Image (tube, rainbow, N blue to C red):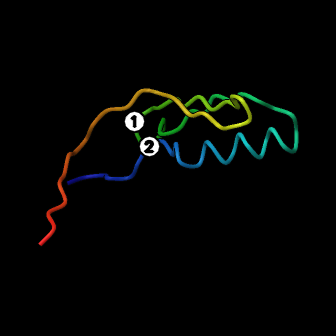
Amino acid sequence: MGEVEDPATGSAAGPLIAYLQDCLDIDRVEIEQGVQMGRPSRIEARMESGRPRVSGDVTVLSVGRVRLP
């Protein structure tokens, strides 16, 4: 299947911006990842009404279903 590593970690961007807001009063960051692996991505994380908001574009690589017995 080749590389299956996620080039962008949106699940880490929310806690990161919350931490930066709390410690350094930074309320918006742009995160670039995946460049060296040939899958560049850009995530924007910002604080909105006291809550982290993460956004960016995605490319669907696979789709699946869970079947319950």
Q: How many numbered circles are shown?
A: 2
> Which class describes the residues within 10 Å of circle 2: few (<14), some (14-19), or many (20+)?
some
Q: Position of residue 16 (x, y in %)?
A: 69, 45
Q: Residue at x 41, y 48 (%)?
A: 6
Residue kind at label 1, given as amino acid type: Arg
Q: Position of residue 21 (x, y in %)?
A: 80, 38
Residue kind at label 2, given as amino acid type: Pro
Give the label on residue 7, or none. 2
Along the horizontal axis of the image, is 44 left or right of 24? Answer: left
Give the label on residue 39, or none. 1
Q: Quadrant of the C terminus?
A: bottom left
Asked if residue 1 is positioned above or below residue 44 in the image, the reply reads: below
Q: Secondary structure at mark 1?
A: loop
Q: Residue furthest bottom?
A: 69
Residue 31, quarter of picture: top right
Give the label on residue 30, or none. none
Along the horizontal axis of the image, is 4 left or right of 56? Answer: left
Between residues 40 and 18, which one lies in front from this camera angle? 18
Q: Residue at x 73, y 43 (%)?
A: 18
> Which class describes the residues within 10 Å of circle 1: few (<14), some (14-19), or many (20+)?
few
Q: Residue at x 74, y 35 (%)?
A: 50
Between residues 55 and 61, which one lies in front from this camera angle? 55
Q: Secondary structure at mark 2?
A: loop
Residue 62, quarter of picture: top left
Q: CA distance from mark 1 to mark 2?
A: 6 Å
Q: Quadrant of the N terminus?
A: bottom left
Query: Do tag 1 and tag 2 residues touch (Cβ < 8 Å)?
Result: yes
